[in-house]
Protein backbone atom coordinates (compact mmCIF):
# COMPACT_ATOMS: atom_id res chain seq x y z
CA UNK A 1 0.00 0.00 0.00
CA UNK A 2 3.08 2.26 0.10
CA UNK A 3 5.75 2.40 -2.55
CA UNK A 4 8.95 4.30 -3.27
CA UNK A 5 9.79 4.00 -6.97
CA UNK A 6 13.33 4.60 -8.17
CA UNK A 7 14.03 4.86 -11.87
CA UNK A 8 17.60 3.60 -12.28
CA UNK A 9 17.52 4.43 -16.00
CA UNK A 10 16.92 8.05 -15.03
CA UNK A 11 19.97 7.93 -12.74
CA UNK A 12 22.14 6.59 -15.58
CA UNK A 13 20.66 9.16 -17.97
CA UNK A 14 21.49 11.94 -15.51
CA UNK A 15 25.02 10.61 -15.11
CA UNK A 16 25.47 10.71 -18.88
CA UNK A 17 24.01 14.22 -19.02
CA UNK A 18 26.80 15.37 -16.69
CA UNK A 19 29.40 13.47 -18.71
CA UNK A 20 28.19 15.18 -21.88
CA UNK A 21 28.64 18.61 -20.29
CA UNK A 22 32.24 18.31 -19.15
CA UNK A 23 35.61 16.90 -20.10
CA UNK A 24 36.35 16.20 -16.42
CA UNK A 25 35.85 12.77 -14.88
CA UNK A 26 32.48 12.47 -13.15
CA UNK A 27 32.45 10.98 -9.67
CA UNK A 28 28.97 9.76 -8.70
CA UNK A 29 28.19 10.36 -5.02
CA UNK A 30 26.10 7.51 -3.58
CA UNK A 31 26.52 8.21 0.14
CA UNK A 32 23.61 8.00 2.61
CA UNK A 33 22.05 5.04 0.82
CA UNK A 34 22.36 6.81 -2.52
CA UNK A 35 20.55 9.89 -1.17
CA UNK A 36 17.79 7.49 -0.12
CA UNK A 37 17.55 5.95 -3.60
CA UNK A 38 19.35 2.69 -2.68
CA UNK A 39 23.15 2.76 -2.61
CA UNK A 40 23.68 -0.75 -3.95
CA UNK A 41 21.11 -0.49 -6.73
CA UNK A 42 22.33 2.92 -7.87
CA UNK A 43 26.01 1.98 -7.65
CA UNK A 44 25.45 -1.28 -9.54
CA UNK A 45 23.53 0.47 -12.33
CA UNK A 46 26.30 3.08 -12.63
CA UNK A 47 29.07 0.48 -12.45
CA UNK A 48 27.47 -1.33 -15.39
CA UNK A 49 27.18 1.98 -17.21
CA UNK A 50 30.95 2.48 -16.84
CA UNK A 51 31.01 5.13 -14.10
CA UNK A 52 34.39 6.88 -13.70
CA UNK A 53 34.42 6.88 -9.89
CA UNK A 54 31.97 6.33 -7.00
CA UNK A 55 32.07 8.25 -3.74
CA UNK A 56 30.55 7.80 -0.31
CA UNK A 57 31.11 9.51 3.02
CA UNK A 58 31.95 6.62 5.39
CA UNK A 59 34.52 3.88 4.97
CA UNK A 60 31.83 1.35 5.95
CA UNK A 61 29.75 2.42 2.97
CA UNK A 62 32.78 2.06 0.70
CA UNK A 63 33.58 -1.41 2.05
CA UNK A 64 29.96 -2.49 1.61
CA UNK A 65 30.10 -1.41 -2.03
CA UNK A 66 33.32 -3.32 -2.62
CA UNK A 67 31.93 -6.39 -0.83
CA UNK A 68 28.90 -6.34 -3.12
CA UNK A 69 31.17 -6.62 -6.14
CA UNK A 70 31.53 -3.05 -7.36
CA UNK A 71 34.60 -2.82 -9.60
CA UNK A 72 34.78 0.94 -10.10
CA UNK A 73 37.09 3.26 -8.16
CA UNK A 74 35.59 4.19 -4.78
CA UNK A 75 36.47 7.22 -2.64
CA UNK A 76 35.32 7.98 0.91
CA UNK A 77 36.13 11.09 2.90
CA UNK A 78 34.47 11.05 6.34
CA UNK A 79 36.85 9.00 8.43
CA UNK A 80 36.55 7.95 12.06
CA UNK A 81 39.35 7.38 14.51
CA UNK A 82 38.77 3.61 14.59
CA UNK A 83 38.39 3.07 10.85
CA UNK A 84 40.46 0.19 9.49
CA UNK A 85 42.78 1.82 6.93
CA UNK A 86 44.57 -1.44 6.25
CA UNK A 87 41.31 -3.01 5.12
CA UNK A 88 40.61 0.14 3.10
CA UNK A 89 43.96 -0.20 1.31
CA UNK A 90 43.44 -3.94 0.71
CA UNK A 91 39.98 -3.19 -0.69
CA UNK A 92 41.38 -0.51 -2.99
CA UNK A 93 39.34 2.25 -1.37
CA UNK A 94 40.70 5.76 -1.87
CA UNK A 95 40.69 7.90 1.28
CA UNK A 96 39.92 11.60 1.61
CA UNK A 97 42.35 12.79 4.25
CA UNK A 98 41.58 15.79 6.48
CA UNK A 99 43.77 15.35 9.58
CA UNK A 100 47.40 14.54 10.37
CA UNK A 101 46.26 11.44 12.29
CA UNK A 102 44.44 10.11 9.24
CA UNK A 103 47.39 11.05 7.03
CA UNK A 104 49.84 9.02 9.12
CA UNK A 105 47.42 6.10 9.26
CA UNK A 106 46.93 6.14 5.51
CA UNK A 107 50.64 6.52 4.68
CA UNK A 108 51.52 3.65 7.03
CA UNK A 109 49.36 1.20 5.03
CA UNK A 110 50.08 2.66 1.59
CA UNK A 111 46.48 3.71 0.96
CA UNK A 112 45.57 5.85 -2.04
CA UNK A 113 44.94 9.32 -0.69
CA UNK A 114 43.11 12.48 -1.65
CA UNK A 115 44.16 15.42 0.51
CA UNK A 116 41.27 17.66 1.50
CA UNK A 117 42.02 21.32 2.12
CA UNK A 118 39.61 23.63 3.89
CA UNK A 119 39.17 26.66 1.65
CA UNK A 120 36.39 28.27 3.66
CA UNK A 121 33.61 25.84 4.57
CA UNK A 122 35.20 25.27 7.99
CA UNK A 123 34.16 21.63 8.10
CA UNK A 124 36.56 18.88 7.09
CA UNK A 125 39.93 19.49 5.40
CA UNK A 126 43.29 20.79 6.55
CA UNK A 127 43.11 24.37 7.83
CA UNK A 128 45.11 26.92 5.85
CA UNK A 129 47.47 27.40 8.78
CA UNK A 130 48.50 23.74 8.46
CA UNK A 131 49.10 23.67 4.70
CA UNK A 132 52.86 24.24 4.95
CA UNK A 133 53.32 21.49 7.52
CA UNK A 134 51.04 19.22 5.47
CA UNK A 135 52.87 19.61 2.18
CA UNK A 136 56.24 19.32 3.91
CA UNK A 137 55.10 15.95 5.28
CA UNK A 138 54.18 14.66 1.82
CA UNK A 139 56.91 16.51 -0.11
CA UNK A 140 58.01 14.64 -3.22
CA UNK A 141 55.14 12.15 -3.05
CA UNK A 142 52.45 11.36 -5.59
CA UNK A 143 48.89 11.66 -4.29
CA UNK A 144 45.67 10.61 -6.00
CA UNK A 145 43.84 13.81 -5.33
CA UNK A 146 43.70 17.28 -3.88
CA UNK A 147 40.19 18.47 -3.14
CA UNK A 148 37.94 20.89 -1.33
CA UNK A 149 34.21 21.66 -1.08
CA UNK A 150 32.31 24.89 -1.78
CA UNK A 151 29.92 26.62 0.63
CA UNK A 152 27.50 27.86 -2.10
CA UNK A 153 27.09 31.07 -0.15
CA UNK A 154 27.57 33.52 -3.02
CA UNK A 155 29.56 33.69 -6.25
CA UNK A 156 32.09 35.93 -4.49
CA UNK A 157 32.57 33.42 -1.67
CA UNK A 158 32.84 30.48 -4.07
CA UNK A 159 35.40 32.31 -6.24
CA UNK A 160 37.36 33.13 -3.12
CA UNK A 161 37.42 29.43 -2.23
CA UNK A 162 38.58 28.63 -5.76
CA UNK A 163 41.45 31.13 -5.39
CA UNK A 164 42.49 29.49 -2.11
CA UNK A 165 42.31 26.08 -3.77
CA UNK A 166 44.71 27.35 -6.46
CA UNK A 167 46.97 28.61 -3.67
CA UNK A 168 46.98 25.16 -2.06
CA UNK A 169 47.78 23.60 -5.44
CA UNK A 170 50.78 25.89 -5.93
CA UNK A 171 52.00 25.20 -2.44
CA UNK A 172 51.78 21.46 -3.08
CA UNK A 173 53.68 21.82 -6.37
CA UNK A 174 56.28 23.93 -4.61
CA UNK A 175 56.90 20.96 -2.33
CA UNK A 176 57.25 18.58 -5.24
CA UNK A 177 53.89 16.90 -4.59
CA UNK A 178 52.43 15.28 -7.73
CA UNK A 179 48.62 15.46 -7.79
CA UNK A 180 46.82 13.07 -10.13
CA UNK A 181 43.37 14.69 -9.84
CA UNK A 182 42.15 18.00 -8.49
CA UNK A 183 38.44 18.23 -7.65
CA UNK A 184 36.29 20.96 -6.15
CA UNK A 185 32.81 21.17 -7.68
CA UNK A 186 29.70 19.31 -6.54
CA UNK A 187 26.40 19.65 -8.47
CA UNK A 188 25.88 23.37 -7.79
CA UNK A 189 29.49 24.25 -8.60
CA UNK A 190 29.33 22.12 -11.74
CA UNK A 191 26.36 24.06 -13.06
CA UNK A 192 27.49 27.57 -12.08
CA UNK A 193 31.25 27.41 -12.61
CA UNK A 194 32.58 25.47 -15.62
CA UNK A 195 36.05 26.79 -14.78
CA UNK A 196 35.95 24.77 -11.55
CA UNK A 197 35.41 21.36 -13.18
CA UNK A 198 39.19 20.73 -13.05
CA UNK A 199 40.06 17.00 -13.35
CA UNK A 200 36.97 15.62 -11.64
CA UNK A 201 33.56 16.74 -10.38
CA UNK A 202 31.62 15.10 -7.53
CA UNK A 203 27.96 14.84 -8.43
CA UNK A 204 25.36 13.87 -5.83
CA UNK A 205 21.92 15.46 -5.97
CA UNK A 206 22.05 16.00 -9.73
CA UNK A 207 22.55 12.30 -10.29
CA UNK A 208 19.12 11.74 -8.78
CA UNK A 209 17.65 14.35 -11.12
CA UNK A 210 17.19 17.07 -8.53
CA UNK A 211 18.31 20.68 -8.43
CA UNK A 212 20.92 21.75 -5.88
CA UNK A 213 19.37 25.21 -5.85
CA UNK A 214 16.38 26.20 -3.74
CA UNK A 215 15.30 28.86 -6.23
CA UNK A 216 16.09 27.24 -9.60
CA UNK A 217 15.17 24.05 -11.44
CA UNK A 218 17.64 22.28 -13.76
CA UNK A 219 15.75 21.34 -16.91
CA UNK A 220 18.19 18.75 -18.30
CA UNK A 221 17.82 16.38 -15.34
CA UNK A 222 15.13 13.73 -14.71
CA UNK A 223 14.00 13.10 -11.12
CA UNK A 224 14.49 9.41 -10.32
CA UNK A 225 12.34 8.96 -7.22
CA UNK A 226 8.61 9.06 -6.64
CA UNK A 227 6.57 8.18 -3.55
CA UNK A 228 3.12 6.61 -3.71
CA UNK A 229 0.47 5.22 -1.41
CA UNK A 230 -3.14 4.23 -1.82
CA UNK A 231 -6.27 5.55 -0.20
CA UNK A 232 -7.35 3.10 2.50
CA UNK A 233 -10.28 4.98 4.00
CA UNK A 234 -12.64 7.69 2.79
CA UNK A 235 -15.38 9.38 4.73
CA UNK A 236 -17.69 12.36 4.74
CA UNK A 237 -17.10 14.74 7.61
CA UNK A 238 -19.15 17.73 8.66
CA UNK A 239 -18.29 21.39 8.48
CA UNK A 240 -16.20 22.37 11.52
CA UNK A 241 -15.32 18.81 12.52
CA UNK A 242 -11.75 18.42 13.82
CA UNK A 243 -9.27 16.43 11.70
CA UNK A 244 -6.21 14.55 13.06
CA UNK A 245 -4.23 15.28 16.26
CA UNK A 246 -4.83 18.71 17.74
CA UNK A 247 -7.72 19.34 15.33
CA UNK A 248 -5.48 21.65 13.34
CA UNK A 249 -7.90 21.44 10.43
CA UNK A 250 -11.66 21.98 10.49
CA UNK A 251 -13.32 22.11 7.07
CA UNK A 252 -15.31 25.21 6.13
CA UNK A 253 -18.04 22.97 4.71
CA UNK A 254 -18.92 19.28 4.63
CA UNK A 255 -16.21 17.41 2.75
CA UNK A 256 -14.72 14.03 1.85
CA UNK A 257 -11.52 13.16 3.69
CA UNK A 258 -9.27 10.31 2.53
CA UNK A 259 -6.65 8.51 4.57
CA UNK A 260 -3.20 7.88 3.06
CA UNK A 261 -1.05 5.38 5.01
CA UNK A 262 2.27 7.24 4.76
CA UNK A 263 3.46 8.96 7.92
CA UNK A 264 6.51 10.50 9.48
CA UNK A 265 7.81 6.99 9.97
CA UNK A 266 8.02 6.89 6.16
CA UNK A 267 9.78 10.25 6.09
CA UNK A 268 6.72 12.43 5.50
CA UNK A 269 7.72 15.42 7.65
CA UNK A 270 5.43 15.97 10.63
CA UNK A 271 5.94 19.73 10.35
CA UNK A 272 4.71 19.75 6.73
CA UNK A 273 1.95 22.30 6.14
CA UNK A 274 0.46 23.12 2.75
CA UNK A 275 1.55 20.10 0.70
CA UNK A 276 -0.56 18.78 -2.18
CA UNK A 277 -0.68 15.25 -3.57
CA UNK A 278 -1.70 14.09 -7.05
CA UNK A 279 -4.69 11.81 -7.41
CA UNK A 280 -6.14 10.91 -10.81
CA UNK A 281 -5.54 14.13 -12.79
CA UNK A 282 -6.01 16.48 -9.84
CA UNK A 283 -4.14 17.81 -6.83
CA UNK A 284 -5.57 17.69 -3.31
CA UNK A 285 -4.30 19.34 -0.11
CA UNK A 286 -2.88 17.41 2.81
CA UNK A 287 -4.86 18.53 5.87
CA UNK A 288 -4.35 18.19 9.61
CA UNK A 289 -1.28 16.88 11.41
CA UNK A 290 0.83 14.25 9.69
CA UNK A 291 0.91 11.24 12.03
CA UNK A 292 3.39 8.38 12.41
CA UNK A 293 1.62 6.06 9.97
CA UNK A 294 -0.71 8.26 7.97
CA UNK A 295 -1.98 11.60 6.76
CA UNK A 296 -5.28 12.89 5.42
CA UNK A 297 -6.26 14.68 2.25
CA UNK A 298 -9.29 16.85 1.55
CA UNK A 299 -11.16 15.71 -1.57
CA UNK A 300 -14.01 18.23 -1.38
CA UNK A 301 -16.97 16.52 -3.03
CA UNK A 302 -14.84 14.12 -5.09
CA UNK A 303 -14.90 10.40 -4.40
CA UNK A 304 -12.51 7.61 -5.32
CA UNK A 305 -12.59 3.88 -4.65
CA UNK A 306 -10.38 2.53 -1.86
CA UNK A 307 -7.06 1.45 -3.33
CA UNK A 308 -6.78 4.48 -5.61
CA UNK A 309 -3.10 5.48 -5.94
CA UNK A 310 -1.88 8.82 -4.62
CA UNK A 311 1.41 10.35 -5.76
CA UNK A 312 2.97 12.05 -2.73
CA UNK A 313 5.79 13.42 -4.87
CA UNK A 314 7.36 12.47 -8.17
CA UNK A 315 6.39 13.32 -11.71
CA UNK A 316 3.28 15.37 -11.03
CA UNK A 317 4.18 16.84 -7.65
CA UNK A 318 7.80 17.99 -7.38
CA UNK A 319 9.60 16.84 -4.24
CA UNK A 320 10.52 20.51 -3.77
CA UNK A 321 6.87 21.25 -2.93
CA UNK A 322 7.02 18.81 -0.04
CA UNK A 323 10.41 20.17 1.03
CA UNK A 324 9.11 23.76 1.06
CA UNK A 325 6.03 22.71 3.03
CA UNK A 326 8.39 21.44 5.73
CA UNK A 327 10.96 24.25 5.63
CA UNK A 328 13.67 22.02 4.22
CA UNK A 329 15.36 21.03 0.95
CA UNK A 330 14.88 18.19 -1.55
CA UNK A 331 18.12 16.53 -0.29
CA UNK A 332 16.64 15.98 3.19
CA UNK A 333 13.31 14.63 1.93
CA UNK A 334 14.75 11.96 -0.40
CA UNK A 335 17.47 10.95 2.04
CA UNK A 336 14.98 10.26 4.83
CA UNK A 337 12.18 8.73 2.82
CA UNK A 338 11.35 5.06 3.29
CA UNK A 339 10.15 3.52 6.52
CA UNK A 340 7.81 0.63 5.75
CA UNK A 341 7.29 1.53 2.11
CA UNK A 342 8.13 -1.09 -0.52
CA UNK A 343 10.93 -0.13 -2.88
CA UNK A 344 10.52 -0.73 -6.55
CA UNK A 345 13.43 -0.28 -8.95
CA UNK A 346 12.71 0.51 -12.56
CA UNK A 347 15.31 -0.60 -15.10
CA UNK A 348 14.63 -1.43 -18.74
C1 LIG B 1 27.82 15.14 -0.56
C2 LIG B 1 29.03 15.73 -1.17
C3 LIG B 1 29.07 16.02 -2.55
C4 LIG B 1 27.86 15.95 -3.45
O1 LIG B 1 27.13 17.16 -3.31
P1 LIG B 1 25.82 17.45 -4.19
O2 LIG B 1 25.43 18.83 -3.81
O3 LIG B 1 24.80 16.45 -3.75
O4 LIG B 1 26.19 17.29 -5.62
C5 LIG B 1 30.29 16.41 -3.08
N1 LIG B 1 31.38 16.55 -2.31
C6 LIG B 1 31.36 16.33 -0.99
C7 LIG B 1 32.61 16.52 -0.18
C8 LIG B 1 30.18 15.91 -0.37
O5 LIG B 1 30.17 15.69 0.95
Image: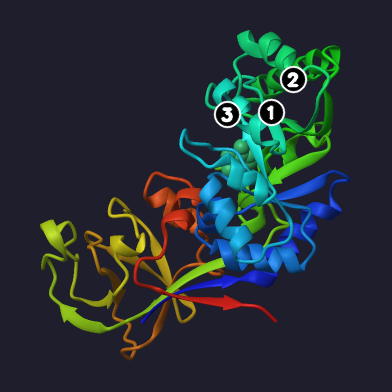
x 81%, y 24%: residue: 141
Give how far apart the Cα atoms at labels 3 and 1 are: 10 Å
x 69%, y 71%: residue: 9
Query: Is the residue marked by circle 3 packed among few (<14), some (14-19), or many (20+) residues within 10 Å?
Result: some
Whole-percent x and y of residue 97?
62, 30
Q: Quadrant of ligand 1?
A: top right
Give how far apart the Cα atoms at labels 2 and 1 are: 10 Å
Residue 265 vs residue 7: left or right? Answer: left
Give how far apart the Cα atoms at labels 2 and 3 are: 13 Å
Circles 2 and 1, Cβ within 8 Å, touching? The answer is yes
x 70%, y 82%: residue: 348
Label 2 sits on residue: 138
Total numbered circles: 3
Name the mark on residue 115: 1
Label 3 sits on residue: 102
Query: Is the residue marked by circle 1 packed among few (<14), some (14-19), or many (20+) residues within 10 Å?
Result: many
Image-quadrant location for residue 216 = top right
Query: Is the residue marked by circle 2 packed among few (<14), some (14-19), or many (20+) residues within 10 Å?
Result: some
Where 319 falls versus 328 (above or below)? below
Whichever of labels 2 and 1 marks the residue nearer the N terminus, that label is: 1
Image-quadrant location for residue 137 = top right
Nearer-the-camera pick, 19 or 57? 57
Secondary element at image label 1? strand
Residue 215 seen from this side: no
Secondary element at image label 3? helix
Amino acid sequence: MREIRVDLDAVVRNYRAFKARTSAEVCAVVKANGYGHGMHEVATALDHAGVDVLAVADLDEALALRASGIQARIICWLLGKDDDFELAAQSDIELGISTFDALEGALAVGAKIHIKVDTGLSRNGFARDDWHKLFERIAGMEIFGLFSHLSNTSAADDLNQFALFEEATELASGHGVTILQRHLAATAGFIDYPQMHLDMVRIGIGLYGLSPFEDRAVDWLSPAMSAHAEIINLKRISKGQGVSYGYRFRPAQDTNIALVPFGYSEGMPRVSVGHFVALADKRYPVVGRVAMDQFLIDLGDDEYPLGTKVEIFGERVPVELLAQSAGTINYEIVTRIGGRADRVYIQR
